[in-house]
Amino acid sequence: MDGKLIVFEGVEGCGKTSQIQLCREWLQSLGISVIVTREPGGTELGLHLRRLLLEKAEKQPIAELTELLLYAADRAQHVEQELKPNLAAGKYILCDRYTDSTTAYQGYGRGLNISLINQLNYIATSGLESDLTIWLDVDVEVGLARKQGNGDSLDRIEQEAIAFHKKVQQGYAELAATHPARIIRVDGNSSKEAVQQVIQKVLRLHLQELP
Ligand code: TMP
């Protein structure tokens, strides 16, 4: 069986982490070899970059272009070290965020040039696209309330104003409209179990070789 890159995307608190775990269990129960990974932070180097990127704002804020380049650096390392070898070994990779996060957050959220981001995404991935991207669509307010309800303190990006997160959400909506074959919207507002049922149906429909 060929390897597959399946990406989960969405705004803060959209439920990616739980859905990825449920999906991993389901795929493993079908006898499929699964790897779970994430961006930023899917490699040892990436873990350092993740800390730099998500620590609370310091006295000297990270410039927007620097932020973009750090996400791209994390991705370049992740693609070479984790994604390509595991795909070549025929694994199913469940990846928490990928190139669409950069378009949504740095492009739509920060307002950086989208064609520059497309080029950087291409350079960082050497053109490796996801086989399928699940966009878990939840209202921004619902997602942020979930995060706050968990009692965790908010990281540098989660702390951004609601207007920023709404622009990110708009970015995902536009990306999904532009790439309907690759990005599938799943309503993330219902229960974990109900959302997982929909995801499994979507994967069966789009990855026809599933047993
Ligand atoms: P998460 O992995 O816990 O969702 O957190 C990652 C954070 O980094 C989240 O706020 C989204 C942000 N992010 C970007 O801004 N650009 C990117 O390219 C990626 C991968 C993540």
Image (spheres, helix red, strand yellow):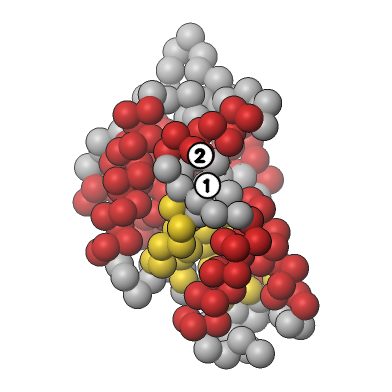
Point out residue 14 in the picture as x, y percentages from the top left corner: 52, 47
Q: Tag 2 or tag 1, which sits nearer the N-term?
A: 1
Residue 88 can be seen in this image: no
Q: Residue at x 30, y 67 (%)?
A: 179
**For this view, does 17 lie left or right of residue 59?**
right
Quarter of the N terminus within the rendering: bottom right
Q: Secondary structure at mark 1?
A: loop
Q: Residue at x 42, y 25 (%)?
A: 160
Q: Residue at x 54, y 54 (%)?
A: 190
- The numbered dot on residue 14 is 1
State whether residue 163 is above or below residue 194. above
Task: Give the residue number, with chain letter if any, for mark 2.
Answer: 143
Contact between marks 1 and 2 (CB within 8 A): the answer is yes
Point out residue 96 in the picture as x, y percentages from the top left corner: 57, 54
Point out residue 196 in the picture as x, y percentages from the top left corner: 61, 65
Task: Pick out the residue farthest to the top.
Answer: 59
State whether residue 126 is above or below residue 62. below
Crowd rating for badge 1 (residues with CA inside 10 Å; few <14, some 14–19, many 20+): many
State whether residue 150 is above or below residue 74. above
Residue 6: name its quadrant.
Answer: bottom right
